[in-house]
Image (cartoon, helix red, strand yellow):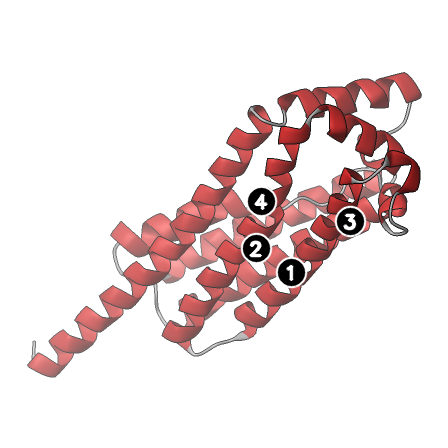
Amino acid sequence: MTSVTAVRAGTGSADRTSVGRAVLGAAATWVLYVVLIATTSAGYEQALADASEDTGTAVNRLPAETLAEIGQDHPWSFLANVMLLVLPAALIVVARRVAAVTGSRAALATAWVAAAVWAFYLLLQVGLLTDPESLPPLTRDLDVLTVPLVSAGSVLSTASFVLAAVALRRRGHRPVAALVAAAVAILAVVAMAITLVTSGFEEPIAPIGLFPAELVLGIALLVGRQR
């Protein structure tokens, strides 16, 4: 191996390591989100389930006034909502590093659009911290906005990851793992889209496929062989 070849190989390995760490970091944010849901938001989630059962209304269709009242009884639950900024931010970091390695900026552009959707949804959630009797205009419509906004944010986030995986595959960075990761993310969205339709559009598309997909790709970039 010549010195030039060795340098290129070392640079490629460093690039993969940088992206791999970012991808695993994004996966770690999902672990944090689940921990917050299971701890600080546990009471809130149970109260939502109880209200849904009492009123015969799907959780995602509960009136904003009800959400505000429950939220005020469980103030620490809002910590989980903050993850609506952390999760897309982690995806932006991944997309930026992929762009630096591959030259493709499609994933980055899509990640920013996804982040804008999640930020807007969080802004509506912040409105629930006000008086339940005088909620901000759009916050009052959360019963009809939650499903489309969450679904849009999820699809865009997944699209950003898939575009990043495809860009890595095209440049020869763990092509098999990149293909598998992209397939996992896409199949999860398809499954959730089916649930969206069969539930009567009461259950949004959630980005559940990102966690396993990010684990597959992140681990492969760090420790897998070049295949």
Check disc 3 and report the residue beneath it.
Answer: 124
Inspect this view and state whether residue 227 appears: no
Against 202, residue 165 (above or below) is below
Instruction: Determine whether the residue tagged by mark 3 lies in a helix, strand or loop.
Output: helix
- 135 relative position to 159: left or right: right
Picture disc at residue 114: 1
**Distance of label 1 from label 2 (alpha carbons):** 7 Å
- Quarter of the image for residue 170 reads bottom left
Picture disc at residue 174: none
Quarter of the picture containing the N terminus is bottom left
Check disc 4 and report the residue beneath it.
Answer: 83
Q: Which residue extends farthest left?
A: 2
Against 130, residue 161 (above or below) is below
- Which residue is at 68% across, 48% downward? 190
**Distance of label 4 from label 2 (alpha carbons):** 8 Å
Label 3: few (<14), some (14–19) or many (≥20) C-alpha neighbours in 10 Å: many
Earlier sequence position, callout 1 versus callout 2: 2
Earlier sequence position, callout 3 versus callout 1: 1
Check disc 2 and report the residue beneath it.
Answer: 88
Earlier sequence position, callout 3 versus callout 2: 2
